[in-house]
Image: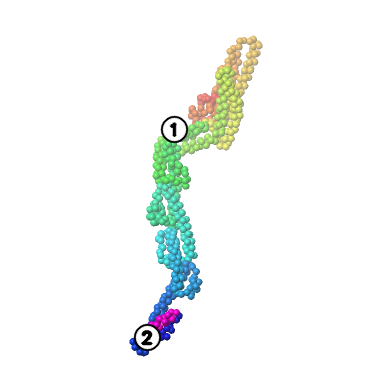
């Protein structure tokens, strides 16, 4: 019985031994009362001992299995913790293992389980972050590529073994780089799309059709879930589209400018009113603008070009029927320019000749019109080159007019009367006397400038078909004759006074006849007698054109003669006459022969004043 209690130790064993001993004593008392023998009692005790060993063995086996399960669970949890921490890039568990080395198994499990749950949550969060970043990266890559198929799946992320912060930062850096590239490309695509939209508006083209040719995602009809394609092929396609549209805009603008230039020429030829031109003010404004400033819709549309082309065709047809009228109008314009500049227009484009050529059909009216335009330009250029001399001629003519007025004023016996406005005439006469003294210098200066102009242009300076130098030389000669005539008239008057005095002394004084004014004496002619048998000596030189009284020839008086007769038949020689080398009688016959074939004109009379 002692052996039964030996396997137990400590207080538990003592308690078990006391309990088993009490039961054994009670069992022995019962066996005694029953009358069991010692052998039976020993057998039954051996059987009880075997049954106790079986119970102990069963409990030991159960405890061993529990211990093995706890060891396996601890190892698995520690391995999972190590794997998760390794994937997350955390520190190892060596310190925790050292701390739990002596701890019971259940305590070890209690320490590992919370850490494992925490690491699992952290890994799930890290996996979610990786999944989102990888999804964004693949989406942007697909947008940057020529196809937009998103290749992101859960297996791709689950296959990932490295969920460390370093790897996460690498993905984030890659995502930022792709996002920046996407932003740059999207900005470039938007710029190209805006340019295509603006150019299509200017050219009147369908914007959606043009961008659909590049990629369907570039306009809003591609679907709500379809993003804008920003691949290299899309950008290159938009770039080529912009270049083609700009080239189309350049060609249309050049075509419009050519048509507008033709319109301006036709308007000028047809003298189109400003009101009618105003209908095409928009076209002219577009043609005068640069390419980059043309932005409003339909500026270079086909309708605009058709409108300009229709107007050009209409005016061209109208021009064909009005060319003759235009030729006449340009001839009148040429004659006006030549008349203002006192030059002779080309006789080949005279109205009677142009009418005959147009009616006969031998010459194209457009060619005649072009010739007239060239003559008009040439006449304007010549008029500009003659402006300085023409201004001086006008000043000289104005001085000659003042001289004529002064001569008439001096013949008026009532010029000093106190009549109304007499003081104004006196003031004008004073200014005229000063101006008349400058005429010789003006003529000499004009001759010098005319010679300089002729040397520069290598051609004579013609004034209404006559060389100006000849007119000026004749004017100077006529002015000298006039001065000599005045001097002879003063000498004659002085001689008459002396003869009259001598006659009175010899025969006595007689009643003085009524004195006539100088104007009547001039009107009586140079060969009229003085009443006393004395004849006024004839002038040394007859009038240049056969007149009795020499007059000064000016371009103004000369132009009247050339405007009334055929200029081709009356054109004088451009070579100046040498009046010094011609004898008096020959000069008179020469001037008479020159002027005898034509009627006397104011130009001829003014020459000898």
- Measured as percent of width and height from the top left, residue 590 is found at 56, 26
Residue 470 in sight in this render: no
Q: Is residue 100 above or below residue 134?
A: below
Read off the magenta span: 11-26
Residue 426 visible in the current orientation: yes
Location of residue 418 in the rendering, given as x and y in whole percent from the top left corner: 58, 18
Nearer to us in this view, 343 or 133: 133
Furthest-left residue in view?
Answer: 34
Crowding near the residue tagged with mark 1, few <14, some 14–19, many ≥20 C-alpha atoms within 10 Å:
few
Residue at 43%, 76% (x, y): give it.
67
Q: How many marks?
A: 2
Look at the magenta stretch and give its main secondary structure: helix
Quickly name the residue at label 2: 28
Q: Quadrant of the C terminus?
A: top right
Occupied quadrant, residue 59:
bottom left
Disc sitting over residue 352 in the figure: 1
Q: Which corner quadrant of the image does residue 518 belong to?
A: top right
Q: CA distance from mark 2 to mark 1?
A: 177 Å
Q: Residue at x 43, y 41 (%)?
A: 282
In the shown orientation, is residue 369 left or right of residue 410?
A: left
State whether residue 126 is above or below residue 251: below
Percent x, y for residue 542?
57, 23
Residue 315 falls within the magenta-colored stretch: no
Q: Nearer the viewer, residue 440 or 173?
A: 173
**Residue 425: image tag:** none
């Amino acid at each position: 019985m002692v052996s039964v209690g030996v396997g137990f130790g400590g207080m538990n064993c003592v308690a078990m031994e006391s309990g088993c001993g009490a039961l054994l004593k009670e069992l022995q008392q019962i066996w005694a009362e029953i009358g069991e023998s010692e052998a039976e009692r020993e057998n039954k005790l051996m059987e009880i001992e075997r049954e106790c060993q079986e119970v102990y063995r069963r409990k030991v086996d159960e405890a061993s299995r529990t211990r093995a399960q706890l060891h396996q669970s601890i190892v698995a949890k520690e391995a999972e913790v190590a794997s998760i921490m390794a994937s997350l890039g955390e520190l190892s568990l060596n310190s925790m293992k050292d701390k739990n080395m002596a701890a019971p198994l259940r305590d070890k499990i209690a320490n590992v389980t919370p850490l494992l749950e925490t690491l699992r949550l952290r890994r799930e969060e890290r996996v979610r972050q990786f999944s989102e970043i990888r999804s964004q990266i693949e989406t942007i890559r697909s947008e940057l590529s020529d196809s937009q198929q998103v290749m992101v799946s859960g297996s791709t992320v689950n296959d990932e073994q490295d969920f460390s912060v370093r790897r996460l930062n690498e993905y984030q850096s890659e995502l930022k780089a792709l996002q920046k590239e996407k932003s740059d490309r999207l900005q470039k695509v938007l710029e190209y799309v805006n340019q295509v939209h603006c150019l299509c508006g200017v050219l009147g083209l369908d914007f959606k059709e043009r961008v659909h040719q590049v990629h369907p995602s570039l306009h809003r009809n591609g679907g709500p879930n379809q993003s804008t394609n920003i691949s290299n092929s899309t950008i290159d396609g938009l770039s080529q589209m912009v270049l083609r549209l700009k080239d189309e805009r350049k060609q249309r603008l050049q075509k419009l400018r050519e048509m507008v230039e033709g319109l301006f020429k036709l308007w000028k030829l047809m003298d189109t009113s400003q009101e009618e031109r105003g209908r095409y003010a928009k076209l002219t404004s577009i043609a005068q603008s640069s390419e980059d400033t043309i932005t409003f819709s339909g500026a270079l549309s086909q309708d605009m070009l058709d409108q300009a082309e229709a107007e050009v065709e209409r005016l061209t047809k109208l021009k064909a029927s009005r060319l003759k009228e235009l030729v006449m109008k340009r001839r009148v314009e040429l004659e006006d320019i030549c008349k203002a500049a006192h030059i002779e227009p080309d006789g080949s484009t005279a109205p009677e000749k142009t009418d005959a050529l147009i009616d006969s059909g031998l010459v194209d009216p457009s060619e005649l019109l072009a010739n007239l335009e060239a003559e008009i330009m040439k006449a304007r250029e010549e008029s500009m080159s003659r402006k300085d001399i023409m201004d001086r001629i006008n000043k000289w003519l104005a001085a000659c007019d003042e001289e004529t007025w002064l001569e008439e004023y001096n013949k008026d016996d009532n010029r000093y009367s106190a009549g109304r406005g007499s003081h104004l005439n006196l003031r004008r006469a004073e200014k005229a006397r000063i101006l008349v003294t400058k005429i010789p210098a003006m003529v000499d200066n004009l001759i010098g400038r005319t010679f300089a102009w002729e040397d520069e242009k290598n051609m004579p300076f013609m004034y209404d078909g006559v060389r100006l130098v000849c007119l000026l030389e004749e004017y100077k000669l006529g002015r000298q004759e006039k001065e000599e005539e005045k001097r002879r008239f003063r000498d004659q008057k002085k001689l008459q006074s002396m003869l009259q005095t001598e006659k009175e002394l010899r025969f006595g004084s007689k009643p003085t006849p009524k004195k006539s004014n100088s104007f009547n004496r001039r009107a009586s002619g140079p060969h009229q007698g003085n009443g006393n048998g004395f004849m006024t000596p004839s002038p040394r030189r007859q009038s240049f054109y056969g007149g009795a009284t020499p007059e000064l020839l000016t371009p103004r008086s000369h132009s009247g003669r050339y405007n009334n007769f055929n200029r081709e038949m009356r054109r004088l020689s451009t070579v100046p006459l040498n009046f010094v080398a011609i004898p008096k009688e020959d000069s008179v016959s020469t001037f008479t022969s020159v002027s005898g074939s034509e009627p006397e004109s104011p130009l001829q009379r003014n020459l000898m004043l």
